[in-house]
Amino acid sequence: MRPVDERIMETMRDEGNLTPQAVENFGVCSRSHASVRLSTLKKYGLVERISQGLYRLTDAGRAFLDEELDASELDPRET
């Protein structure tokens, strides 16, 4: 996990489903960096892709933000 990952997920919690472009529009990071980080967060089950380029926060992502889940306990999933 990187600090930007938490900022992306906090923005998703506050704003709803987001694309990498929307992450950039909210001033979190560039679109290209958001795309890479969202793909990584997806591998760990913290976000899920609901359509081409659109992501939403999962229950695990919410638990992480609520400090109910330790990211070190997560294993990457095969995609």
Image (spheres, rainbow, N blue to C red):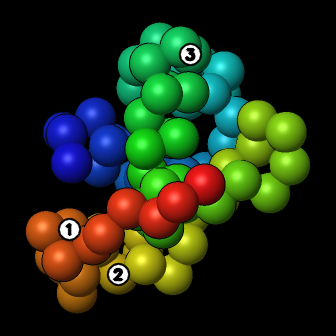
Tag 3: residue type? Arg
Q: In the rendered image, which residue does mark 2 sit on?
A: 63
Tell me the CA gap for discs 2 and 1: 10 Å
Q: Which image quarter: residue 69?
A: bottom left
Q: In the rendered image, which residue does mark 3 sit on?
A: 31
Q: Residue at x 18, y 39 (%)?
A: 3
Q: Which image quarter: residue 70?
A: bottom left
Residue 17 visible in image: no
Mark 2 secondary-structure assignment? helix
Q: Residues within 10 Å of mark 3 (few under 14, many from 20)?
A: some
Q: In the rendered image, which residue does mark 1 sit on?
A: 71
Q: Residues within 10 Å of mark 1 (few under 14, many from 20)?
A: some
Determine whether 3 is above or below 1 in the image: above
The answer to whether 22 appears left or right of 61 in the picture is: right
Q: Which image quarter: residue 29?
A: top left
Label 2–label 1 contact, CB within 8 A: no
Point out the tag, 2 or 1, that comes first from the N-terminus.
2
User: Nearer the observer, disc 1 or disc 3?
Assistant: 1
Tell me the CA gap for discs 1 and 3: 24 Å
* Image coordinates for residue 39, horizontal then vertical, percent: 53, 41
Tag 2: residue type? Ala
Determine whether 37 is above or below 49 in the image: above
Mark 1 secondary-structure assignment? helix
Q: Residue at x 60, y 54 (%)?
A: 79
Q: Residue at x 67, y 42 (%)?
A: 18
